[in-house]
Image (spheres, rainbow, N blue to C red):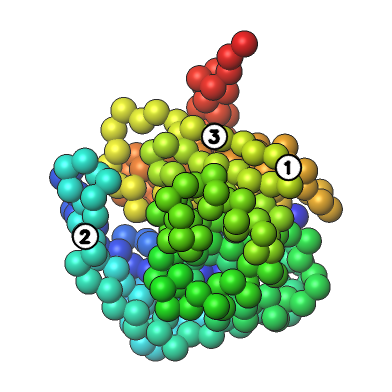
Amino acid sequence: MSVLISGSIALDHVKTPHDEHDNLLGGSASYAAIAASHFAPVNLVGIVGHDFPEPHLELFKKHKVDLGGVEFSEGETFRWSGEYFDDMNSRETLDVALNVLEEWQPKIPDSFKESTRIVLLANAHPENQHSVLDQLGDGPIFTIADTMDLWITIARDRLHELMKRIDLLVINDSEAKQLMETTNLITAGHRMLELGPKYVIIKKGEHGALLFGPHRFFSCGAYPLKAVYDPTGAGDSFVGALAGYLAGLGKDEFSFDDLAAAVARGTISAGYTCESFSTHKLESLAKDEFETRLEEFRQFTRFE
């Protein structure tokens, strides 16, 4: 079973205390797609410009990512530039150039409509997320949406409407507090469930994630990393791996335990993302390496 991922595809310039790199593969959909591809085939929907490097396209193809939904424009690719400081938790955005992304309207190929069962609306404007759902109709069995503080500020009403149309909302801790106007994450999680989604996941960065569902709750820690080189895209990798894992199960419906298992896979994928710039670690990640770390994580969190 394939997963459709719609969102931004970018070229990033990232500076950290460790190093600095330009023209890195970036964007919410890019990280999510590479992470998801370790579990299931991916149908990608996005837009790139004439300056998008061919090696990045080849990387997608190598990882079973179908580019049939990617629009190739004569303009320039969406670009983001940022700098991380010593603790790697503090980040400053240096520059954002939306370029071709500014006027982009997602277009879902007919072939994707026929095969799509799992949908991941990666971080993007709620209008674009609604558009994807409008085009897919009743086909998908499970829909996931990620969001951020900007959309809460400028498109709160459309985000609330989106929450009624999805099965799972993924949001980070500060944004959950902002959206629900509370300082308590447990309160925020339950309030978001009342707005429509069957499940809610609150990402807590280096502290893991919280999963809320009908009458059940799951707290997942983060895999302890000895070094963090670039946390860009970790949250996108988290939700991508989660979506890919669910698609790989091949089920018509998912239990709370399926979601909890998916959260664990997402946490491991996010950790790998932090261990290199861009998607570099995810690109070379072997299945046995992933499974070894997952088993270590089980041992870390098991007790009597």
Amino acid type of the residue that numbered disc 3 sits on in the rendered structure: Cys
Q: Earlier along the polypeptide chain: callout 1 or callout 2?
A: 2
Foreground disc of the pair 1, 3:
1
Numbered tag placed on residue 220 in the rendering: 3
Looking at the image, residue 212 sits to the left or right of residue 127; the answer is right
Q: Rate crowding at label 1 as few (under 14), some (14 to 19) or many (20 or more) other CA atoms within 10 Å.
A: few
Depth check: 290 or 185 in front? 185
In this view, 66 is above or below 48: above
Give the percent coordinates (x, y) of residue 240.
55, 53
Q: Earlier along the polypeptide chain: callout 3 or callout 2?
A: 2
Q: Residue at x 59, y 63 (%)?
A: 145
Depth check: 298 or 44 in front? 298
Q: Residue at x 54, y 22 (%)?
A: 301
Numbered tag placed on residue 92 in the rendering: 2
Foreground disc of the pair 1, 2:
1
Q: Rate crowding at label 2 as few (under 14), some (14 to 19) or many (20 or more) other CA atoms within 10 Å.
A: few
Identify the image quadrant of residue 270: top left
Q: Rate crowding at label 3 as few (under 14), some (14 to 19) or many (20 or more) other CA atoms within 10 Å.
A: some
Depth check: 6 or 205 in front? 205
Numbered tag placed on residue 215 in the rendering: 1
The N terminus, quarter of image = bottom right
Looking at the image, residue 251 sits to the left or right of residue 206; the answer is right
Amino acid type of the residue that numbered disc 2 sits on in the rendered structure: Glu
The C terminus, quarter of image = top right
Depth check: 300 or 150 in front? 150
Give the percent coordinates (x, y) of residue 220.
54, 34
Element class at badge 2: strand
In this view, 172 is above or below 295: below
Element class at badge 1: loop
